[in-house]
Amino acid sequence: MMKIQFQAIEGYAYGAIQPSTIFRFSVNEILPSDHVDELVKLFSTVTASHATDIFEYEDVTHGPNHAPTLFIGILAALTQHSGDRRLSTIKAFSEGDTVVYALPTLSTDMTWHTLIALSKFLKDTNYNSTEAQLSEFLNGLKSSNRKFLPGGTNTMNFLNAAAQHKIPFKVFRQNYLILGYASGSTILKSSITDQETSIGVSLARSKVDTNRLLKLSGLPVPDQARIQTITQAKHFAGEFGYPVVLKPEDESQGRGIYANISDEKELIWCFEKVANTYPTLLIEKHITGDHYRIDFMGEELIKAVRRRPPEVVGDGIRTLRELIAELNLDPERLDPYSSKKIVVLDEDLERCIKKQQVSLDDVLETKRIIYLKSISNLSRGGDQIHVEDDIHPENFKLCQMIARTMRLDVLGIDLLSPDLSKPWHSNGTVVCEVNAQPQLGASGTDVYWRFMKNYLRPPVRIEVEVTNDTSQSQAPLFDTEVSRLKIKLSVADAFSQGCPVQYFQDFKIADDVAAADRRRLERLFVSVNPEGA
């Protein structure tokens, strides 16, 4: 096995706009030919779905089978396979008798975990892995690495937009994204901004509070009651009239919801499925109509879509199970940063297809449409069509009223309506839910950049100085009262932590810094100035 020196830099180094992991190999490193052959095989396999022109070389030369380069290429592909985002190239350069690779990553902990896992895999397989062993390794690694990365789809897409527009960012505890510095800094938690009211976010977390507050304000909502027993469920179902909906009070992304429950027998079945997980449930009158999601920002429209439950169309040849498998091959469903997920074979699907008198192994006749879920959430496999141009002005005003009532600047509003192009008060439109942390849903950066730039503050001027003085204090990086940052670092801290900021206008190296250290610092500290700086 190769001898590797590993270093995690949580700041910024060599022009990367994210943390980096540094690997050092001896230039005299020689591996047995069979070990090199295995690295070549793994490199061609694991990089097949990733770009291979990922290196930027400086004063480094090597052949096509250079073991350190193969190893780092494999490691880079494995971290990307696990969901990491590399937003700049891997730098490779020489330092004396070592070859250095600077691998950008969103999580240095994940890269370390992947390094250990890869080393163990090579040792356990004795550098002679089978296809089955590699497949098992890849699946296990992807599962274990997810805990190191930001959750949800919003944060990753905001990261992409920030990188594209050179906006400095820091991922903080996987849940928060900090953009900019000092008075120019903004903090996001998914789509919740630091300018949002805690009252609005708290109200929206409770479906009961949302329903009651909107009802008090004269806004249209479905009849609703909180229940804990099947006796209560039967009582309110009789009072509201079938069909009804069962849902958890404070869950999101459609989890635990059973819609369009048509009779008491089905109500009992659904209640038994969900009551053990959620001791307190809501029962609502089921409203006939399409499900619309309207995302608002500052009373302005971000996007509007009509959501539909997932469906398949028979071809007279394939079974329902095979048609679902084909549906799940949609690239958007497989994109880990998209809100649109695969259709899972769960109890709601079982219930829906049973009501349509088919089973998973039935061959569907040509053109027969089968609906696969009772709800249309993208996270449950639903689909959507953009309808921004179809919203009636009265419905637009309704959404603005909801935003003001809920004290929310950013929100997702779920409307149930026969037709959103008609005024809400003319066709029985109701407000189903309000989400204070809407998943913006689209792949790509346009909608995320449009959202982000609405909350960005002007960038501040930053000066960085490196000295041999070790008594430096931490700079107020995110103090919104500070309009100009002056950062002083010791040489030791600079080499161990990198630059604490992604950009700076002035960079000074004190006269007391040795010439050799000065050359390393000049290579290490590279400013990536944001747009507008």
Image: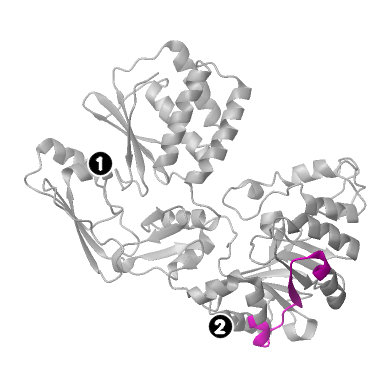
Check disc 1 and give the amino acid type: Ser
Residue 94 in the image, given as x and y percentages of width and height: 26, 29
Residue 246 in the image, given as x and y percentages of width and height: 77, 65
Please state which of residues 402 and 520 is positioned toward the viewer in this rendering: 402
Among the 4 quarters of the image, the one containing residue 116: top left
Among the 4 quarters of the image, the one containing residue 321: top right
Instruction: Describe the element under mark 1 as helix, strand or loop.
Output: helix
For the point 38% across and 61% down, which residue is it? 179
Please state which of residues 81 and 52 is positioned toward the viewer in this rendering: 81
Among the 4 quarters of the image, the one containing residue 398: bottom right
Tell me where the magenta segment starts and ends, as one range.
Answer: 213-233
Please state which of residues 238 and 10 is positioned toward the viewer in this rendering: 238
Residue 427 in the image, given as x and y percentages of width and height: 79, 82
Residue 368 in sight in this render = no
Residue 324 in sight in this render = yes
Give the vertical position of 76 relative to 262 (above or below): above
Residue 220 in the image, given as x and y percentages of width and height: 71, 82
Total labels drawn:
2
Quarter of the image that includes the C terminus: bottom left
Answer with mark 2 or mark 1, whichever residue precedes in sequence: 2
Instruction: Describe the element under mark 2 as helix, strand or loop.
Output: helix
Check disc 2 and give the amino acid type: Arg
Give the vertical position of 408 relative to 161 (above or below): below
Q: Which mark is residue 487?
A: none
For the point 31% across and 48% down, which residue is it? 11
Q: CA distance from mark 2 to mark 1?
A: 49 Å
Q: Residue furthest top?
A: 33
For the point 75% across and 81% down, which residue is it? 422
Which residue carries the number 1 mark? 496
Q: Which mark is residue 404?
A: 2
